[in-house]
Amino acid sequence: MTSLNYDTNLDSQDDSETSYLLNNDNENVQEETSWLGRLRKPHLLWMIPFSVTLSIIMTSIEAPTVQFIMELACDEFKEQNKDKNLSNDDDCGLREVQIIASNYVMWYSTLSHVAVTLSIGYLSTLSDYLGRKFVFRLSTIGIILAIANIIMVAHYWRIVGIGFLYVGSIIQGLLGGVIAINTACHAYLSDCTSSENRSVAFGLMHASAFCGMAIGPTLGGLIVKATGSILSIFYVALCALIVFLIIVLFIVPESVSPSIRDLNYSTSPPTSIKHILSPLTIFTQPPTEIGEGDRNRSWRGKNTLYILAVIYFFYRISQAAQNEIINLYTKYKFGWTSLENGYFLSLQALTRFIALIAILPLLRLIRSRYQSSYARSLDIWTMRGGLIMEIIGFILFAVASKPFWFYFACVINSLATITSPAMRSLFTTYVLSTQAGQILGAISVLESIGSILSPLWMNKLYNWGISNEIDEIVFWANTGIFIVSFVLGSLIL
């Protein structure tokens, strides 16, 4: 019954906000009321299967991509050391191979994030006056080209070199990749839902994405195991994305009408690269919702937004490259294949899904029973609780000597996903209601910078740990980061 009520509410939109979606000069009244006419209109329900499908496809190749790079690095190492008679598969577990593979994974991820950071603002603007489907098409083509490049390098790496993988990574990033598609999905939902129901729509889309993330990694591992070839999952993903692109081209309706696109084209010029860091200036203003005396006299009061920004930045530089490091570490420590890593990533997504649909709403229900000052306090304690779970999770990762304990650490670490929405809520609490968009834009900039730096420091530290037989040092370093973050979180008023 609840879902039916959501559907009804989402359809009953404010004409002033989304009426352009309901007007099309080429449609007559009969078509408007027909089943086919209603089906061809943009709606929340288009984005749910869209999100599930894309999540399954992309997470199914996440662990195999790292595994594939490790195999190529091993083959390259054997080619360069023929005099050592390295032919056993166990030789791929050598520390030298781990370091080579880690460097390739680091630059593959870093270059993609740099490219996305440069293009995401421009592509987001393009979606306003060329339509959301334009970004869906362009970014999907970029992902297809990146996967096709992986397949090509697999067959011709001796000719083009393993570094040619970076070309596909950069192309995918410049065309937006999954990040641009996710942004366009949120914009699509904004187009076809009223403002009061938008958070419900976003929540349903995020839940559907986590469902796909729970399925995709295990499915990818099973395909690799069944076929006996790691390349098989890339062929399957390539075919699935081509079908996905065809559906986007010919079936999914556009949510921005031509008249609105023309209006946006004249009023919203593309974002310039030189303005990428400009949203961060909002952190310089004094926070709201704190007593004037505290803001003026207390160092904590005046710098609350700065402190929150540092915590969020620390959070991001730990999270962005975490799964790549775990894939490398578990292959080296436990001999995991794509299947075991798929189980791990599925467990991670499932736990995060439960945290978002059960724990966080329960906390929000408690929050709704209190006044705003107590609501802010609840967000603060939710953030601190999440940071504590991050600390415990990374300690368990570091000391886990058996796969079971590593899976258990995954559950504890994944429950800490409640940290991010709590921090986002706090950010919007400490600024004026009219500045919510500005502060969320500043958060996006922090995420982009953190995503670039995360693989750089984590992979370099992992390499150093492997060389000095301190394999788990990267987990201890993350533990230290979150201890500092918790100390900073205790300063928030």
Image (cartoon, grey):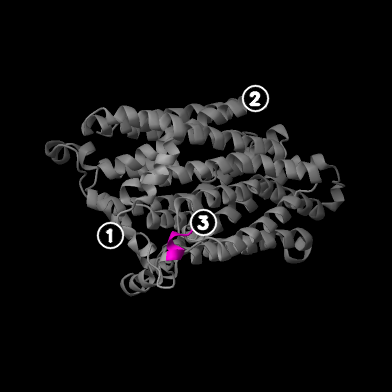
Q: Secondary structure at mark 2?
A: helix
Disc number placed over residue 404 in the picture, else none: 2
Residue 40 image offset from top left, x and y in percent: 49, 61
Which of the marked residues, 1 or 3, is nearer the chain's N terminus? Answer: 1
Disc number placed over residue 113 in the picture, else none: 3
Disc number placed over residue 16 in the picture, else none: 1
Q: CA distance from mark 3 to mark 2?
A: 32 Å
Which of the marked residues, 2 or 1, is nearer the chain's N terminus? Answer: 1
Q: Is residue 417 left or right of residue 20?
A: right
Task: Tell me the residue at 23%/52% (across/down).
Answer: 434
- Is residue 111 on the magenta stretch? no
Residue 492 image offset from top left, x and y in percent: 28, 34
Q: Amino acid at mark 2?
A: Phe
Q: CA distance from mark 2 to mark 1?
A: 55 Å
Which of the two residues, 107 or 185, is positioned nearer the viewer here?
185
Residue 244 image offset from top left, x and y in percent: 61, 58
Q: Secondary structure at mark 3?
A: helix
Which of the two residues, 421 or 114, is positioned nearer the viewer here?
421
Magenta stretch mostly in which secondary structure?
A: helix
Task: Tell me the residue at 65%/25% (across/down).
Answer: 404
Magenta segment, which residues? Answer: 30-35
